[in-house]
Image: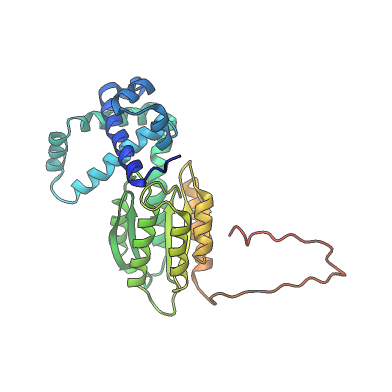
Amino acid sequence: MPRVSQDYLDAQRTEILEGARRCFAELGYEEATVVRLEEATGRSRGAIFHHFPTKLDLFLAVLERDAEREAARWEGGSFADVLAGLAAEDPDWATVVIEQSRRRRTDRSFRARWQGRTDLVRDALHTLVDQLRPSDAVAIVAFSTNARVLRETTRVSERGDLHAAIDRLRPDDSTNLDAGLTLGYRVARDGFREATSNRVIVLSDGLANTGSTDAAEILSKVREEAAKQISLLGVGVGSQYGDALMEKLADGGDGFAVYVSDLDQARDVFVHRLPATLEVRALDAKVQVTFDARTVKDYTLIGYGRR
């Protein structure tokens, strides 16, 4: 069976998103049936659902792609200018926004999915910044199709600037985990501080679907950075979570991985669990435990293999 290149899959995904967007704008969510989506995208249902497991996932991806484009426009120009520009260059933009608003009012499942993918990450990062000491430093990197620096390394004493950068985070249409980690580690190396804990914290669904998706290749980069005393914390979010990849990356990155499904869990990770691991007392430490055979008949090792 011939191997399909990643470039082909990325192009196919983009075509599906563009066609589906026109379909949702013209017909609305309910009337955009699978048959209509096939007609609008020029792709079979098999191709569509290869990239997006459900119609809701497809609609959310369309909205996330729009949100990324909108965020880029907000970086310059007044509120009125931005709205006028978006409406002028894209007649479907306002229709899609209205349909999103309607779904948020009438569909509890959609509302939970949409808010969960944005509010959870932002709230978690706000919580983290508020827990750190003024002398600590944080940089913020966002990634979707590409990765970009939202905020260069900034002292936590300047919390206002960090919170403003966090508020600019928007859900995006894809997960280029490789690009996000590569840029995240580069920024961490640039801001490396001796005799302190240097850590990359990645919040993601762990479903690498664009860029390099080879787990072994991504893992090799993480191991290389871990050897330079930069550890990794993987925080999984989203209803579809690639736990296997995130755990491998965290293990290779001399860190650990957790999954959070709501705001309370996210706050627990950053308020209670993370501070206990931030102060590094030793690197590559190992403990050898030997049981007295006269006392211990049997034992089970729990936790190390799946940190």
Q: Quadrant of the C terminus?
A: bottom right
In this view, the residue in front, 227 or 159, is 227
The relative height of residue 243 versus residue 239 in the rendered view (above or below) is below
Q: Coloured how?
A: rainbow
Q: Quadrant of residue 150?
A: bottom left
Q: Name which residue lies at 33% across and 49% down.
A: 144
* Location of residue 21 in the rendering, given as x and y in whole percent from the top left corner: 28, 31
Q: Name which residue lies at 48% across and 41% down.
A: 239
12 sits left or right of 306 in the view: left
Q: How many marks?
A: 0
241 sits left or right of 133 in the view: right
Q: Residue furthest bottom?
A: 195
Q: Residue furthest right?
A: 294
In this view, the residue in front, 249 or 114, is 249
Q: Name which residue lies at 42% across and 41% down.
A: 2
In this view, the residue in front, 25 or 217, is 217
The relative height of residue 254 versus residue 239 in the rendered view (above or below) is below
Q: Residue furthest front?
A: 1
* Location of residue 81 in the rendering, given as x and y in whole percent from the top left corner: 11, 42
* Location of residue 29 in the rendering, given as x and y in whole percent from the top left corner: 34, 25
Q: Name which residue lies at 42% across and 35% down.
A: 50
